[in-house]
Amino acid sequence: METDTLFIIEEKSDTSGNRPDTPWVRFDFLAKVFNMGGHSMPEDAKAFYQPIISRLKEYFETIPNQTVTFHFEFVYFNSSSSKMILEILELLPENSTVNWYCRNGDEDMFEAGEEFKPILDKELIFNIKMKGFLKALRNTEALFFIDGFLRYLQF
């Protein structure tokens, strides 16, 4: 197995250059922390994900029964990517922690994570990423209420 401690793939845009069609991937093998997310809709999901899956298989064979943490932060993925993500989830050691992040109100990504849960023997921990919440409230009276309430709690 290679001795690299980091494995990074930056997201790439589709042929029109408008939006990313492959996810970003950041694996820190030394820290046993794995992150991937963004958009995943490559033309050939198997070709994109196979090197990632191969690298993970090699690594997990070297650390049987050790704790790892995997963070998924997808905004969108298509059905062929879903199959590859499931394959990654199935590779994880028994005592892995899986964090599935979604934006506040993103029911599609929340439901996607919920659909993976019964298939796996591992428990998914859901973290809802509330990006943009305070930005939306910035010019409203609700922000003043929240600010006042937080100050009250801190005394």
Image: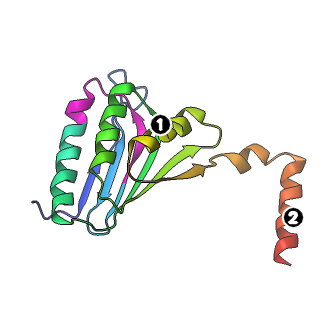
Q: Label 2 sits on what residue type?
A: Phe
Quadrant hosting residue 84: top left
Please tell me which residue lies in front, 29 or 12.
29
Residue 25: x %, y % from top left = 33, 48
Residue at 33%, 67% (x, y): give it. Answer: 67
Residue 119, compared with residue 61, is above or below; it is above
The single residue placed furthest to the left in the displayed view is: 1
Q: Label 1 sits on what residue type?
A: Glu
Residue 125: x %, y % from top left = 51, 54
Residue 58 part of the magenta segment: no
Q: Quadrant of the N terminus?
A: bottom left
Residue at 79%, 48% (x, y): give it. Answer: 138
Q: Secondary structure at mark 1?
A: helix
Say few, some or many: other residues with alpha carbon within 10 Å of mark 2 (under 14 / 14 to 19 / 20 or more).
Answer: few
Q: Which residue is mark 1?
A: 115
Residue at 41%, 44% (x, y): give it. Answer: 37
Residue at 79%, 46% (x, y): give it. Answer: 137
Say few, some or many: other residues with alpha carbon within 10 Å of mark 1 (under 14 / 14 to 19 / 20 or more).
Answer: few
Residues in magenta?
A: 35-48
Quadrant hosting residue 83: top left
Q: Which residue is mark 2?
A: 149
